[in-house]
Image (cartoon, grey):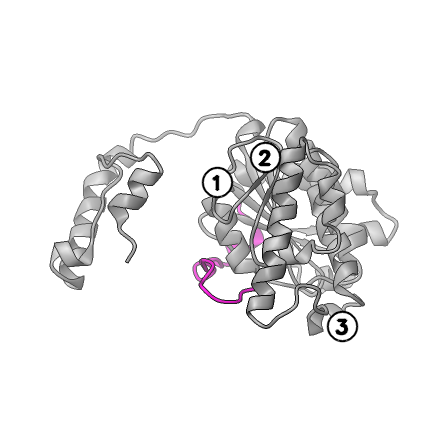
Amino acid sequence: MAQLSEIVAQHGLEPGPLLRILTIQKAGGTRRTIEAGVAAIRAMLPLADRARRETIAASELVLALQCGGSDAYSGIAANPALGAAADLLVRHGGTAILSETPEIYGAEHLLVRRAASAGVAQKLIDRITWWEDYVARNGGAIDNNPAPGNKAGGLTTILEKALGAAAKGGTTNLVDVCRYGEAAGARGLVFMDSPGYDPVSVTGQLAAGATVVCFTTGRGSVFGCKPAPSLKIATNTPMYQRMSEDMDINCGEIVDGKAGIGDMGARIFAKILDVASGAKSKSEALGLGDNEFAPWQIGAVM
């Protein structure tokens, strides 16, 4: 059984006015625990009311890079454009977290070559090796074919998908590799080990410190995310036009010849700054994101 006191101690946290620990067993059952939790929140409200917005640098942002419902345009439009935006954030001193280990399988050598040190490169290789063993123990294969939706969107192999997925990481050095949910301590491009399943991967990125999520999609995923806002980036114009109420940015303009990757990356970066400053993303406006908290469970999760 997980013990909250031990978890708090492991992370160097101290209970205080804004951090309270409750357990059902000690509080006397479910109803009393809920009542105690409500009372604790009420006591915190005067302290919360003292909070004031202030301007901070873009270097404080931690960007979660995600893709889901990928299609043939993901790797040539939205993902490279998101990579360009990630490069801009890193150049401003911020952090970008690339994840979904099974979905970079076959393209990991591109990240290994960009590792800031041999030690960082070895960390990524070790995670790939761990995944090969993990899926074998659970009767699966890490180089399995793309999902039916990926195939319908024009992707032919998982390796093709991996090349596109890795493009979200831009071109800067890979400065660190961390485990699932482990805090991203280094600034720059960080790889966090996670399954390819989007809700599980994003949950780990939030635990690692992500403050904004950018999610590219070719098939039209309407993923939302709380507590960090999620920006939806369309890979093609027809889908964007059908789902304009859900999509924040149309990278189909790259395919249409109306914008370049660098220009679109700058637009994504500007949108990230707007949302981080309080503007609502489409998923926030629709109220999506309450049900996407999905930690990595024991068992095979790809």
Q: Which sits earlier in the primary sequence, circle 1 or circle 3?
A: 3
Residue that mark 1 sits on: 209
Query: Residue 156 or 246: which is nearer the viewer?
Result: 156
Looking at the rendered image, the quarter that the C terminus falls into is: bottom right
In the rendered structure, find residue 95 and report the number of the disc placed on it: 2
Which residue carries the number 3 mark?
152
188 vs 204, left or right, is right
Distance (Cα) linking label 1 and label 3: 34 Å
The image's mark for residue 257 is: none
Q: CA distance from mark 3 to mark 2?
A: 33 Å
**Which of the two labelled residues, at mark 1 and mark 2, occupies the earlier sequence position?**
2
Q: Residue at x 76, y 68 (%)?
A: 153
- Amino acid type, callout 1: Gly
Q: Where are the magenta residues, as a range? A: 280-302
Q: Which quadrant of the figure contains the N terminus?
A: bottom left
- Mark 2 crowd level (few <14, some 14–19, many ≥20, 10 Å Cα): many
Q: Residue furthest left?
A: 28
Q: Main secondary structure of the magenta part?
A: loop
Q: Is residue 154 above or below residue 279?
A: below
Local crowd size for mark 3, using a 10 Å CA cut-off: few (<14), some (14–19), many (≥20): some
Query: Residue type at mark 3?
Result: Ala
Return the x and y of residue 217 as percentages of the image width and height. 68, 58
Answer whether labels 1 and 2 touch (C-beta < 8 Å): yes
